[in-house]
Image (cartoon, rainbow, N blue to C red):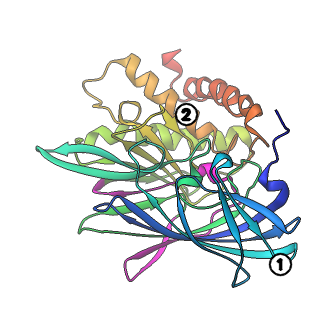
Amino acid sequence: MPALTHFYELFQPEHYDLYIDVNRAAKQITGQSVITGTAAQQSVAIHEKGMTITAVKSNGDNVPFTIDEAAEAIRIELPAAGATTLTVDYSAPLTDTMMGIYPSYYEVDGVKKQIIGTQFETTAARQAFPCVDEPEAKATFNLAVKFDEQPGETIISNMPETHEDNGVHYFDTTKRMSTYLIAFAFGELQSKLTHTKSGVEIGVFATKAHAANELDFALDIAKRSIEFYEDFYQTPYPLPHSYQLALPDFSAGAMENWGLVTYREAYLVLDPDNTALKMKQLVATVIAHELAHQWFGDLVTMKWWDDLWLNESFANMMEYVAVDALEPDWH
């Protein structure tokens, strides 16, 4: 096989301004990805998958582009190498694959409802917005999300919401991070919030199909895990909040999106009075595992997926180190 060209070698993003409009009724996403970065040459490529690309501009001017479906790429011809702002207008379907931006289905009192969530690891951010979708290609992100919003709905993301204008929710600028760790979710959510000793807001979010007390155990473990890791790593948790979200439909066990960790419901919410100790231990280790990643994987990230073991083996160890420190009686 020919050597794989990493798109990051062709174009190094520094910052994204993302606008994403989700229409649940039409199962359609429309958006604009504005990427400021440096082109190493005139011919560059960024990732897309399953999208319809309507326009590509460089520094405000239309430029020629082609879609390379096999490489999940938009190949772009720039007037010159160097500092470039790419603007890509696109639309894409809202899929039911539990990858990219997708709906989770559930019922409350016999009424069918849905929560929209995200799952981007390994290569599904390119189904949500055009980007250099490689772990090495870290950048800062400004996210703006619009959706067919109903009264009483909540939207959360990696960073706190700064303001809402004309139905568009704007979120604070992220730290430099990989595309696969971007996340957001919206719908009828309930939450419980607390703060660590250092002032990090800890939140647990779930659908209203759950009793309120089912969020308590996870909130306590998440709070104490963050406090433990800040002390153990001697490195402050670098974001304003750490939200834990239970999604009804979720393909993995959990996902360490920076600041908005997503979980299969069984691995986050539980009835504290009617759950076996073994299940509580499992949920605690899953939470501690994902929160270990907030430093090891999110703050420090492998260059390419062949070194994913660096993330995972470390988190696999730290989940036991942390829970043993938090609940020594569990042995």
Tell me where residue 12 sits by quadrant.
bottom right
Please indicate whether residue 83 sits to the left or right of residue 220 in the image. Answer: right
Which one is in front in this view, the residue at disc 1 or the one at disc 2? 1
Q: In this view, does 266 lie above or below 18?
A: above
> Is residue 19 something that shows in the picture?
no
* Residue at (88% x, 64% y) in the render: 40
Per the image, the residue denoted by label 2 is 288
Instruction: Name the residue type under label 2.
Output: Ala
Instruction: Read off the magenta span.
Output: 160-189
Q: Position of residue 72 (x, y in %)?
A: 64, 50
Does 163 lie within the magenta span? yes
Residue 199 part of the magenta-drawn span:
no
Label 1 Cα neighbours within 10 Å, binned few <14 / some 14-19 / many ≥20: some
**Residue drawn at x 39%, y 61% as measured from the top left:** 28
Q: Which residue is drawn at 38% across and 83% down?
A: 166
Q: Is residue 160 above or below residue 219?
A: below
Q: What element carries label 1?
A: loop
Q: Residue 79 carries which label?
A: 1
Type of amino acid under label 1? Pro
Of residue 58 and residue 255, the one placed in the foreground of this image is 58
Q: Using the image as rendered, state which of residue 206 and residue 230 is in the foreground.
A: 206
Q: Quadrant of the N terminus?
A: top right
